[in-house]
Image (tube, coloured by chain):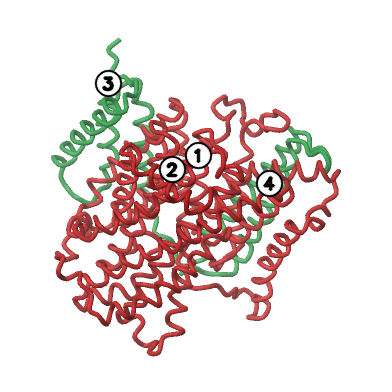
């Protein structure tokens, strides 16, 4: 099946009512959590993981993906109206979106964000369709050593790129890898770190880990947040209309942002937050009047919003064709598929075309739904911003407990959430990234299996990682990433490692 | 400004966890060789790496100051307490009792004063929970407290 045939097939699949309803549910829920500051897409996806046991794996993946990109639309709303980024990806949107709102042009800023997000997603889909076929063909040449090297590159990239303290990132990834060892070892059957608890034989429950690290920790941090009511004003449809001048300024940033986002989204370890920051700094650098940025430049909203949506879509390419998640949210998606008994890999396009092409088509349809629904519903989302967190978080907690419990029907998992939640809260306080822990946790068993297999095939010779061209490429890239911060640190003087401007990763 | 406690304590805790895990893995699982790795090889290597990384995070923090993070012990206690109450109560109090109790515990640190809204909220969430999970998703859970 070629790309465009596949896309048509996928559109037919998604338009079935039983699938479409979950696509709609996903994007609406995603916008909702994106609008609410404090609850990110990670928490929302982990909350919804148990719900997906009741539906088909295709619908589940489509719904979870909808939550992910829906949250980016919602995040932009909170960023523009209140200067509170609902999601980390939309933090950069506050820089120019909020000044626009202060000038009474909130409606135009919202329109720009939504139109750019939609355009970015279209660019992302085109790139994904081209990339997926190529990647799944290339993947047949991948051996165990190549997989192991690529995953290690992903982990190193995720913990070094865009952070000021790589050591803390590495520590979290390593802790995640170590937690991934808990349970029965697949190769030898040995029970590792189970301490006689039968509940741990299958390892730490991914849902409990994700909910504890994100759901519980985020709730604790936001309980005493001051009320946010009465800040944002009402916005009617008429205020959304941009001037001709605004439209003219949007085109270039959208195209450049979409291209940038598509590229970085598909790379392991980078992802959508980084690409929106890169797009912003690129737009500012090439602008004729850079001083307009930060004072309500349309380009500063259009570029990043296009970039983060494109990146959110192309990030699925390595996840689905190689079975290797590039960022923590993709790790959660992969975890969801594994719970459903599906291991994504090079055969995915052939073996489950409805899942792959259905998902690709759902991106287009979901983004269209978001565009069509959110422009008229903007008043509703503004009203959502006024719900005090008082009323929400006790419900979130109860749903979270029942969600975890429903996975295996074990009270043990509820207590595990409390313990993991405490750990997650402490980690967040000390500014250790729980998202990197989760990425390590999901990749851990995959890395260990491929590493052991690679060394078994090479009879214990570690040179296999340099002899195979694909693996050697990943090893060299990893080495560059590791040496770059060291070099920069030496040049800038001791202890002042430079880093790109970016808020803490989730 | 004060000493950078988060990095110091966090790094040391991770280092301790790492060396503990490595020691446990070496003592209890076979390491094998590079060619035929045993179940202990990967965890032992990771544990040691975590030990080193923990020290790399902790040691520079000795000579550095940082802003103290804003800790919310009351929120943390209430939220974690609510989860434990729910877990313990699910079989003894039933879904209705456990939800009511968990919501009341969770809402203790909420900034809004008064108790009427807390009771109403607990009632509303209980109705929602029973509708979604017991009726909607057909989860088999005891609804009411066990009398015997």
* Residue labelled with disc 3: B143
As measured in the structure, the alpha-carbon distance from the residue carrying label 2 to the one carrying label 3 is 32 Å
Q: Please state which of the two labelled residues, at mark 4 or mark 2, is closer to the viewer.
A: 2
Q: CA distance from mark 3 to mark 1?
A: 32 Å
* Frontmost residue, A265 versus B91: A265
* SS category of the residue bearing label 4: helix
Image coordinates of residue A429 in percent, x first then y, are 45, 56
Q: Is residue B25 left or right of residue A283?
A: right
Q: Residue at x 36, y 72 (%)?
A: A302
Find disc 2 in the rendering and name its residue: A61
Q: Can you identify the residue that label 1 sits on?
A: A337
Image spot of residue A22 (x, y percent)? 33, 41
Write down the colour of chain B: green
Looking at the image, tell me whether mark 1 or mark 2 is earlier in sequence order.
2
The mark total stands at 4
Q: Looking at the image, do the residues carrying marks 4 and 1 touch, with CB atoms under 8 Å apart?
A: no
* Location of residue A276 with respect to A397 vertically, above or below: below
């Amino acid at each position: 099946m070629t790309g465009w045939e596949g896309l048509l097939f996928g559109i037919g699949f998604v338009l079935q009512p039983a699938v479409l309803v979950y696509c709609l549910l996903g994007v609406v829920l995603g916008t909702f959590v994106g609008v609410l500051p404090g609850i990110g897409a990670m928490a929302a996806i982990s909350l919804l993981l148990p719900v997906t046991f009741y539906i088909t794996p295709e619908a589940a993946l489509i719904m979870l993906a909808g939550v992910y990109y829906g949250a980016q639309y919602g995040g932009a709303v909170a960023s523009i109206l209140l200067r509170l980024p609902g999601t980390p990806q939309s933090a950069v949107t506050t820089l120019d979106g909020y000044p626009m709102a202060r000038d009474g042009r909130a409606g135009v800023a919202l329109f720009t964000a939504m139109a750019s997000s939609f355009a970015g997603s279209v660019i992302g889909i085109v790139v994904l369709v081209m990339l997926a076929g190529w990647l799944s063909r290339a993947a047949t040449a991948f051996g165990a050593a190549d997989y192991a090297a690529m995953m290690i590159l992903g982990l190193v990239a995720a913990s070094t790129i865009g952070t000021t303290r790589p050591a803390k990132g590495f520590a979290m990834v390593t802790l995640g890898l170590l937690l991934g060892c808990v349970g029965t070892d697949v190769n030898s059957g040995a029970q590792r770190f189970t301490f006689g608890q039968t509940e741990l034989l299958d390892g730490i429950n991914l849902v409990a880990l994700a909910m504890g690290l994100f759901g519980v920790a985020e709730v604790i941090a936001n309980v005493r947040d001051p009320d946010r009511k009465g800040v944002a004003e009402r916005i009617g449809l008429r205020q959304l209309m941009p001037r001709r001048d605004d439209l003219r300024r949007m085109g270039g940033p959208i195209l450049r942002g979409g291209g940038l986002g598509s590229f970085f989204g598909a790379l392991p370890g980078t992802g959508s937050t980084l690409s929106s920051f890169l797009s912003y700094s690129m737009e500012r650098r090439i602008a004729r009047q850079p001083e307009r940025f930060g004072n309500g430049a349309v380009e500063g909203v259009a570029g990043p919003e296009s970039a983060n949506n494109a990146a959110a879509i192309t990030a699925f390419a390595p996840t689905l064709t190689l079975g290797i998640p590039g960022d923590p949210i993709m790790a959660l998606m992969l975890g969801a598929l594994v719970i459903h008994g599906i291991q994504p890999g090079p055969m995915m396009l052939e073996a489950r075309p409805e899942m792959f092409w259905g998902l690709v088509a759902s991106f287009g349809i979901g983004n269209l739904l978001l565009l069509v629904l959110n422009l008229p519903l903007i008043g509703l989302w503004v009203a959502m911003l006024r719900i005090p967190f008082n009323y929400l978080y006790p419900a979130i907690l109860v749903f979270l407990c029942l969600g975890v419990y429903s996975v295996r029907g074990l009270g043990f998992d509820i207590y595990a959430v409390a313990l993991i939640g405490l750990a997650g809260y402490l980690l967040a306080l000390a500014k250790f990234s729980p998202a990197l822990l989760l990425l390590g946790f999901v990749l851990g068993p995959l890395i260990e299996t491929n590493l052991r297999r690679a060394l078994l095939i090479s009879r214990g010779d570690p040179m296999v990682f340099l002899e195979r061209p694909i693996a050697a490429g990943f090893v060299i890239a990893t080495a560059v990433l590791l040496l770059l911060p060291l070099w920069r640190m030496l040049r800038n003087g001791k202890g002042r490692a430079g880093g790109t401007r970016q808020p803490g990763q989730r | 400004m004060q000493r950078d406690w988060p990095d110091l304590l966090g790094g040391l805790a991770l280092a301790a966890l790492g060396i503990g895990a490595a020691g446990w893995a070496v003592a209890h699982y076979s390491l094998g060789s590079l060619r035929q790795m045993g179940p202990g090889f990967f965890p032992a290597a990771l544990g040691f790496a975590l030990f080193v990384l923990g020290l790399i995070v902790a040691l520079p923090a000795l000579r550095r100051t940082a802003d103290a993070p804003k800790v919310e012990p009351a929120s943390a206690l209430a939220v974690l307490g609510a989860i434990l109450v729910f877990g313990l109560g699910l079989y003894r109090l039933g879904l209705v009792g456990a939800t009511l109790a968990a919501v009341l515990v969770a809402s203790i640190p909420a900034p809004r004063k008064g108790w009427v809204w807390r009771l109403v909220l607990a009632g509303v969430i209980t109705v929602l929970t029973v509708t979604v999970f017991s009726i909607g998703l057909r989860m088999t859970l005891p609804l009411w407290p066990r009398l015997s």
